[in-house]
Amino acid sequence: LMMVHRAVLFDRKLQSLLMEYIGLFELQFRAQYSYRLSEERGAFAHRNPKNFKDAKHFKDFLNSYEREFRIQMKNNNADVIRAFDVYGDVPTWQAVEMMSFGTLSKMYSNTRSKTVRSGVAMSFGVTVEELVSWARAISSVRNQCAHFGQLCGKPLVSRPKRIAGASGDNGSVFYIVMLLV
C-alpha cells in the first residue's frame, strides 16, 4: 500500500512540475504564433480561410474558436467584450490567448504560410514538422495533467518526433521532459 501511495504521489508531483514547464512552452508558442501570423497576415488573420491549408480543419477550428469565444463573452471578459464592441471580434493576438492549447496547435499545423510556421519553429530551434509533433504530444500530456490522469507507466497518446541526437523512448512521459528542457 505504501508503494502505491508513493507512486501516486510521485505522479502528482511530476504532473505539477510538467504543468509549470508546459506553461512556459505554451507561452512562447502563443506569443510567437500570434505575432508572426498577425504581422504577416493582418490583425484578424485567424478568421480568413485563405490563411489555412485545409478547409475542413479550418471549419473545425472556427467551431472550437467560436465556442471558446462565447464562453469568454458569457464570463464577462472585459477585454474580449471591448474588442468585440469595436471590431465585431478580437484581433488574432487576443484570439490566440483565449483558445485552448489543443485548438492552437491544430491551427498552427493548418497554417498556410510557411514563413509563419517556420518562424515559430525557429524560435524553438526545431523544424516545423518537429514542432507540430511536439505541440500535439505536449498538448496531450497537458490535458492528462489537467485532469489528473496517470502519467508514469502509461504510453503517450501522441508520440513526438525524436529530438535529433537524443535516445530514449519517445512514447514515455519522460521524453516530454526532455522536449521541454
Image: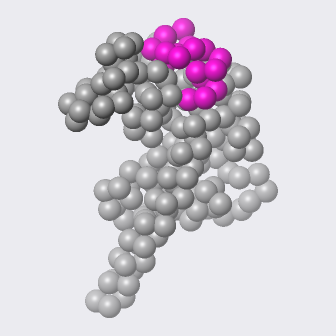
Residue, x 51% and y 54% (percent of image)?
22
Magenta region: which residues?
34-51
Instruction: Specify whether residue 102 is in view.
Output: no
In this rendering, is residue 143 above or below 54? below
Going by the picture, which residue comes out furthest to the right? Answer: 165
- Residue 48 position in % (x across, y down): 49, 11
Assign the magenta stretch its main secondary structure.
Answer: helix
Q: Is residue 52 magenta?
A: no
- Residue 165 position in % (x across, y down): 79, 56
132 relative position to 69: left or right: right
In this rendering, is residue 87 above or below 92? above
In this rendering, is residue 43 above or below 34? above
Residue, x 74% and y 44% (percent of image)?
125
125 relative position to 27: left or right: right
> In front: 68, or 64?
68
Going by the picture, which residue comes out furthest to the top? Answer: 50
> In front: 71, or 121?
71
Instruction: Specify whether residue 89 is in view.
Output: yes
- Residue 30 position in % (x across, y down): 54, 37
Quadrant showing the N terminus: bottom left
> In front: 4, or 119?
119
- Residue 178 position in % (x across, y down): 64, 61
Give the quarter of the image for residue 147.
bottom left
Give the quarter of the image for residue 114.
top right
